[in-house]
Image (cartoon, helix red, strand yellow):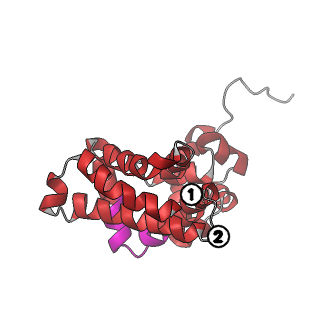
Amino acid sequence: MASRRGRGRPPGESDARARIAAAAVHEFGEHGYEGATVRAIAARAGVDAALVHHYFGAKADLFAEVTDFPLRPDLEVPRILRGPRDEVGERIVRFVLQSFERPEVRKRGIIVLRTAISGKLTAPLLTGFLSKEMLPRIAAELDAPDATLRASMVASQIAGLLITRYLVKLPAMVEAPVDELVARIGPTIQRYLFD
């Protein structure tokens, strides 16, 4: 007589989430963001790809969780772009700065920035994430033949802002109030996007 299985999770399922996260770290590390696939992550973890989606959602969500990425610009910036057009530049700068002014975001964000600048393994991860998840979403919201270049110029300006204020800590950048930086840098972002 076959034994009946009890209710609840199947045996071995309780650690599936942790196995998926560990597998994702390996796959992202070995293949970069673009080269790592949900299917390969699932295979490495010994689970079905549907379970990866169940626990983490999309690949970008899994990446954000395993890298402890403190912001989701791939989701927030396209929402900002759909707002009043004449305020987009300032709203992007304000979103980034207000996020980084929160200690828990700043701490993790600085770690991500440092490792992206200095790490051979992490730079392709961040580049892949930005190239696949964020820049195309920004470009899709713009009505311009050079939309990808415009989105990349915005990313370069924001990266420079974060590096000079939070990593290099140039005194004038550190001391400047958020509102002043928004007022001064926002128009540049606006021009990159729409002029």
For the point 18% across and 52% down, which residue is it?
Answer: 176
- Assign the N terminus to one quadrant of the image: top right
Looking at numbered disc 1 in the image, what kind of residue is underneath it?
Answer: Ile
Q: Is residue 6 above or below residue 112?
A: above
Secondary structure under tag 2 reads loop
For the point 37% across and 51% down, which residue is it?
Answer: 93
Judging by the rendered image, the residue that carries numbered circle 2 is: 145
Q: Position of residue 11 (x, y in %)?
A: 65, 37
Q: Give left or right: position of 152 versus 109.
A: right
| Range of magenta residues | 112-125
Locate residue 82: give its quadrant. Answer: top right
Q: Position of residue 103 (x, y in %)?
A: 26, 43
Badge 1 crowding class, 10 Å Cα cut-off, few under 14, some 14 to 19, many 20 or more, is: many
- Tell us which disc is closer to us: 2 or 1: 2
Magenta span: predominant SS is helix
For the point 52% across and 42% down, which residue is it?
Answer: 84
Residue situated in front as seen by the camera: 193 or 153: 193
Q: Position of residue 148 (x, y in %)?
A: 58, 68
Q: Give left or right: position of 153 versus 43.
A: left
Q: Is residue 28 magenta?
A: no
Return the mark for residue 148: none
Judging by the rendered image, the residue that carries numbered circle 1 is: 138
Q: Position of residue 95 (x, y in %)?
A: 39, 45
